[in-house]
Image (cartoon, rainbow, N blue to C red):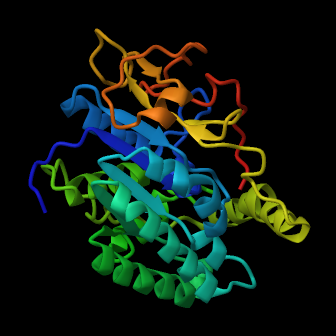
């Protein structure tokens, strides 16, 4: 692996884990590890480009159908693919089909990018993990084989006990909180051969367990706000991702676009970024960006990338 390498572009595809739930910003938008990683890469590389195509609730078949070709067409230096866990949480899951679709995705992505990053995703300690652990580990074993066969990077988050700590997870018990996403961003950063800025796998300080009343209140809130709606969607065949599109996916044309720093500004949390027109992204992804977007530029979020709020897409906590 190249040490202290330079990367000029990043495309992230997957489900809610990569979309950024539940690392919420004050405006209600989500940030997440992929956005954090992109912001750090942009700080060290002028003209850096980024596209996050991930959508919450998506199964691996939907990721392959909706995101893989768009990501492959962008010829990015780095592509991250995390998917399949939503499938393993379904009561009936055909693991052979899931593994076959992951193989298809990797075979289409690996030749089109400089570095393909796969992950053994983290899991929160609790009954859900124990119920579905055999499926998850079968998925991870398949990913290990794919990474070896196609020369992809495999970031092992699952083996870090600290990322199973409930304190790094949101109250919905399905998504990492802000600190959890920060640690994932650091893990990928280091796996790409960049200088570490901390120990992402470090254990959290020992804390006394919460009292009975607090645990009971948390259980009731979880059931009402998250578990019951999740069961309702499963029974009706709906998904939290229905009608949504990736942060850098144009819904009108179903094509991805780059977010790139605006001229005269340094990349950073509050600096200006602009969007490349989807037609430019489709026609010439590998060229140095420089055209303004004829359709107008969405307002920057906290990391400088266009937010869903800027595109007037509502953000509600739905899983």
Q: Nearer the viewer, residue 242 or 166?
A: 242
Residue at the (62%, 78%) spot, across then down: 88
Residue found at x 62% / y 32%: 28
**What is the quadrant of the C terminus in the image?**
bottom right
Would residue 95 be seen by someone viewing this image from the given angle?
yes
Residue drawn at point x = 57 percent, y = 72 percent: 85
Residue at the farthest left position: 3
The single residue placed furthest to the top in the displayed view is 264
Report the side of 257 relative to 156 (left or right): right
Say which of 21 and 67 sits in front. 67
- From the viewer's side, name the closer residue of 234 and 6: 6
* Residue 6 figure quarter: top left
Where is residue 236 drawn, in percent x and y? 90, 65
Identified at 65% across, 74% down, the residue is 87
> Is residue 67 placed above or below 166 in the rendered structure?
above
The quadrant in which residue 256 appears is top right
Above or below, comparing residue 93 to residue 86 in the picture? below
Quarter of the figure with the N terminus: bottom left
Total residue callouts? 0
Q: Is 30 drawn above or below residue 221 in the view shown?
A: above
Question: Where residue 16 appears, x then y in whole percent?
Answer: 58, 54
């Amino acid at each position: 692996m190249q040490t202290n390498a330079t990367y000029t572009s990043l495309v992230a595809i997957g489900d809610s884990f990569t979309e950024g739930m539940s690392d919420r910003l004050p405006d209600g938008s989500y940030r997440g590890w992929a956005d954090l990683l992109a912001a750090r890469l942009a700080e060290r590389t002028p003209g850096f480009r980024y596209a996050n195509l991930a959508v919450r609730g998506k199964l691996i078949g939907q990721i392959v159908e909706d995101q893989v070709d768009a990501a492959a067409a962008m010829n990015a230096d780095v592509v991250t693919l995390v998917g399949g866990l939503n499938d393993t949480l379904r009561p009936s899951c055909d693991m052979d089909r899931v593994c076959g679709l992951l193989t298809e995705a990797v075979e289409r992505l690996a030749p089109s990018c400089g570095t393909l990053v796969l992950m053994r995703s983290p899991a929160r300690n609790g009954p859900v993990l124990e119920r579905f652990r055999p499926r998850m580990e079968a998925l991870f074993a398949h990913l290990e084989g794919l990474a070896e066969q196609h020369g992809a990077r495999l970031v092992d988050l699952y083996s870090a006990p600290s990322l199973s700590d409930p304190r790094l997870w949101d109250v919905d018990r399905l998504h990492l909180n802000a600190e959890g996403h920060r640690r994932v961003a650091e893990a990928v950063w280091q796996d790409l051969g960049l200088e570490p800025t901390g120990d992402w796998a470090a254990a959290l300080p020992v804390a006394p367990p919460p009292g009975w009343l607090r645990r009971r209140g948390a259980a009731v809130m979880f059931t009402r706000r998250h578990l019951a709606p999740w069961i309702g969607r499963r029974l009706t065949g709906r998904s939290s991702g229905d009608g949504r599109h990736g942060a850098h996916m144009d819904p009108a044309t179903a094509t991805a676009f780059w977010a790139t720093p605006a001229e005269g500004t340094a990349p950073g949390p509050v600096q200006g970024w602009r969007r490349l027109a989807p037609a430019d992204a489709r026609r010439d992804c590998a060229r140095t960006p420089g055209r303004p977007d004829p359709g107008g530029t969405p307002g920057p979020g906290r990391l400088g990338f266009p937010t869903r709020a800027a595109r007037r897409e509502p953000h509600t906590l739905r899983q």
